[in-house]
Amino acid sequence: MKKALVATGIILTAVLSLWAFDWPQTEIMADSFFSYFGQYRGGTISTSLVFTDSDEIKAAESGRILALISEHGEDELFESTLGNAAIIIHKDNLATVYANLDSEKHQELFSQTELEKGAALGNTSNSGWQKGEACLEFQVLDTKNQNYINPRILMPRVGKELELSIKNVSAVNKKGTEYDLSTQKNLNSGTYLLYKDQENIAVPYKTTVFVNGAAAESIAFDTLTAKDGRICATGKKAYSASVVYPNSKRQFLGEVTLPKGKNTVSIVVADILGKEKQLTYTLEVR
């Protein structure tokens, strides 16, 4: 059964002070997530951080239980994709979602209202749709601004990050024609969408494109928003999953306008610790 089930439209975010939350599980990891916030997952941009290992789950911050969702129950026609899940509301209009929990401890939560930081929520299980992975799916929502927040910007950052790469950069014009910038150095003037290969696991925390030394576009995966029912990343405008990830292999870097003459296009990708990787192309634009 569901307790005070909130509308599925709970969305989240406004960036607050760093490290406001503890890690939601006992083991602290740095670079070993099953799926990252902002990653291409399930045909859209992932709003969750999915951990890799089974562990004991705890409340990342003190708060009030807003909703409890059961994997299945007598009154439910469809099983929950989150499995057994808890939604906790905190100060500053933030809410946290803990999905894929085991059923034993989850049932005990129905008798509770207020939880302290570090309160036990149970262990991970296979109750959610995680392809058989017994791991936590964790979300942070900003219920006031209706955004999704990258959980990692609110938790302590430890260890190393997976190394990022910039491979196979291409420019796509308004007609959909794609140009490989490693071999195509002559382009017509106009507006282009730039793409690179997706990372194997991680996703850049921020991508920035410079044209002739000036920043043309910057997309940070600190928050995601919902627009017209679609999850979007924000740069100069809101970009839906079909733009950010046109397929399972490519990732959007930004939109640029190239004037006639010699143009220098620089691409910078950064991880959440600020470590950057850069690649520059010199193009003749006619």
Image: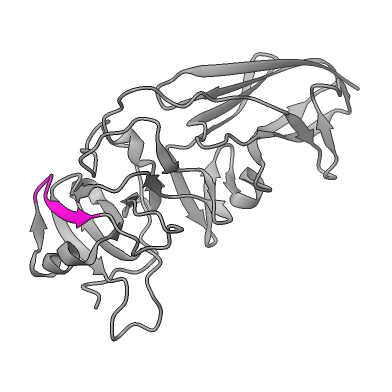
In this picture, residue 270 sits left or right of residue 84: right
In this picture, residue 39 sits left or right of residue 110: right
Front position in the image: 173 or 251: 251
Rendered view: 151 above or below 280: below
Front position in the image: 243 or 48: 48
Residue 76's spot in the image, x, y percent?
34, 82
Rendered view: 191 above or below 240: above
Q: How is the image coloured?
A: one colour
In this picture, residue 283 sits left or right of residue 85: right
Stretch of the chain drawn in magenta: 116-123
Q: Where's the C terminus, which quadrant? A: top right
Number of on-image labels: 0
Q: Where's the N terminus, which quadrant? A: bottom left
Does the magenta-highlighted stretch encompass residue 119?
A: yes
- Residue 269's quadrant in the figure? top right
Write the residue at 65% across / 13% down: 213
Write the residue at 56% across / 37% down: 235
Write the residue at 29% across / 68% down: 6
- Residue 32's quadrant in the figure? top left
Front position in the image: 16 or 8: 8
Rendered view: 125 above or below 245: below
Residue 116's spot in the image, x, y percent?
9, 49
Write the residue at 39% across / 64% down: 9
Residue 200's spot in the image, x, y percent?
57, 36
- Residue 198's quadrant in the figure? top right
Residue 285's spot in the image, x, y percent?
86, 21
Does the magenta-highlighted stretch encompass residue 184?
A: no
In this picture, residue 103 sits left or right of residue 179: left
